[in-house]
Amino acid sequence: MLCVQETKWKGSKSRNIGGGFKLFYHGVDGKRNGVEGILKEEYSKSVVEVKRVSDRVMIVKLEVEWLMITVISAYAPQVGCEMEEKEKFWTEINEVVEGVPRNC
């Protein structure tokens, strides 16, 4: 799975993008931030959950054979962003990581 940040797309969707790939994305205002995951279409059937936490954090869970895999796409605030935004991001990341079962 390829994780891409600062996509600047608005909405929370998944769709086939051609070339045998499927896109999962989440963005709020279409002008900044946004995260997405791109997955080979044949593996999209393995996706068991997509959790869009914020316009900076998204989780995709896949079940591949007998293994559960959790992929986190995250886009950290850059230099110049408000401290409040940075603290919110790191709080979200900590909660997401703590929520991943140890066998994933």
Image (tube, helix red, strand yellow):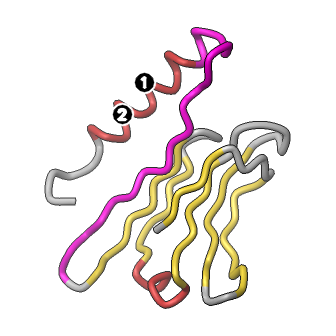
- Figure quadrant of residue 69: bottom left
- In this view, the residue farthest toward the left is 103
Q: Residue at x 77, y 37 (%)?
A: 32
- Quarter of the image that includes the C terminus: bottom left
The reply to whether callout 1 and callout 2 are in contact (CB within 8 Å) is yes
Labelled disc at residue 78 = none
Question: Residue 13 at x, y = what percent?
Answer: 69, 65
Question: Residue 36 at x, y = what percent?
Answer: 61, 57
Question: Residue 6 at x, y = what percent?
Answer: 69, 44
- In this view, the residue farthest toward the top is 83
Labelled disc at residue 91 = 1
Q: Residue at x 46, y 68 (%)?
A: 1
- Figure quadrant of residue 66: bottom left
In magenta stretch: residue 76: yes
Instruction: Give the magenta-colored segment's residue range.
Output: 66-85
Question: Residue 40 at x, y = what percent?
Answer: 52, 82
Identify which residue, 97 or 18, lies in the foreground: 18
Q: Amino acid at mark 1?
A: Thr
Q: Residue at x 76, y 54 (%)?
A: 11
Identify which residue, 61 or 38, lies in the foreground: 38
Q: Is residue 75 above or below residue 50?
A: above
Q: Residues within 10 Å of mark 2 (few under 14, many from 20)?
A: few
Q: Residues within 10 Å of mark 1 (few under 14, many from 20)?
A: few
Name the residue tied to disc 2: 95
In magenta stretch: residue 31: no
Q: Amino acid at mark 2?
A: Glu
Q: SS at mark 2?
A: helix
